[in-house]
Amino acid sequence: MKVFINKRIPETGIKMLEEAGLEIILSENENLSHEEWLSYCKNTDTILNVGGDFKYDKKFFDACPNVKAIALYSVGFDHVEIKEATQRHIPIGNTPDVLSRATSDVAFLLMQSVARRASYNFQKVKDGNWNAFDPLHALGQELYGKTLGIFGLGRIGYEMAEKSKKAFGMNIIYHNRNHNEEAERELGAAYVSFEELIKNSDVLSVHANFTPEHKELFNYTLFEQMKSDSIFINTARGGFHNQKDLYQALVDKKIWGAGLDVTNPEPMSSDDPILGLSSVCILPHIGSATVEARNGMARLAAGNIIAFSKKEKMPYCANPDVYSDHAS
Ligand code: DGY
């Protein structure tokens, strides 16, 4: 069985696939054009997909009828039309849990970087602009006892809430599809309506799965309802926020700061004026970029392909309905 991999993954995953006797087709060019990618996909049975550049939609599945399974090298699956895949009995694997710590670490890092204007001050040092001690210039704010609002309290949101509670004694409020009983019990997290989350958070951190109805949910109208000294953090997907509105809300002092590991668009332009603001910190989607997380993702993605090759269920599957009798 052939496995097409569009970008090299850690050796541990490659080794697993080799030991399972699978034929690995590794893209020579790491930055494939859409046409190049499609021609690889037309000639494979399974795909181990790295990144969100390529969309797996109806058009793709029609064009590549040989593809029988896809293992994503990500926890997010917003680039896949899940319903379409399920109807065609194509399991879509993903990589939950192994990157929760690393991604929540980045949310926690951004929260502090923004609160203390770390990027701005680092840039000053690099620019040779140290300046004399100034009691009033570019002051940050402390996070002790403040309220952290989590939008989407799953595994990553839980880790962010736990760290913030332990480090700064933050009060946790959250909005989610379902109650998270563990967070309520262990962290004293309070379930609130979406409106309350927006109005009462000192730091609002997005950790939900991105779906089309979330497109630019965080826009100017919403930022206007937040506290004027609040911080917006997004480590989930750039599509959650309208970046021009975010910039304007910061300029108009509707909110105080923003930390992004995901941008809209992604990649964003280096000319984006938001980069010039002092209470902003932006990273290039590095949430899972640790040795530990990336090795874990490689193991899970390879394990999903291997399970499929043995006609077993993928252990980490984004569309488990594919295994039920009602899949089509
Ligand atoms: C994920 O796993 O979804 C990360 O955002 C990397 O794409």
Image: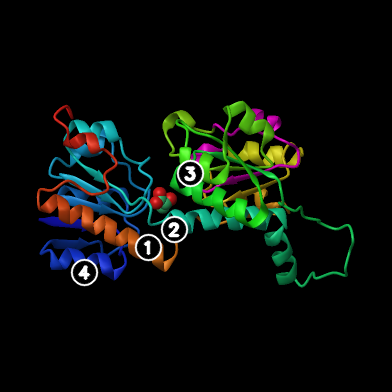
Say the numbered circle drawn on residue 15: 4
Residue at 69% from the left image edge and 61% from the top image edge: 118
Residue 17 appears in the rendering: yes
Identified by mark 3, the residue type is Arg
Mark 1 and mark 2 residues within 8 Å of each other at the beta carbon? yes
Residue 177: percent from left, percent from top: 45, 30
Percent position (x, y) of residue 205?
A: 58, 44
| Image side of residue 33 versus residue 120, left or right | left
Marked residue nearer the N-terminal end (3 or 4): 4
Which residues, given as a range, are shown in magenta? 217-241
How far apart marks 3 and 1 lie (CA) works out to 18 Å
Q: Which amino acid, mark 4?
A: Lys
Which label belongs to residue 294? 1
Q: Is mark 2 on a helix, strand or loop?
A: loop
Q: Mark 3 points at which residue?
A: 237
Q: Is mark 2 within 8 Å of ligand 1?
A: yes
Q: What residue is drawn where x is 52% and y is 48%?
A: 235
Q: Which mark is residue 288?
A: 2
Left or right: 258 in relation to 182: right
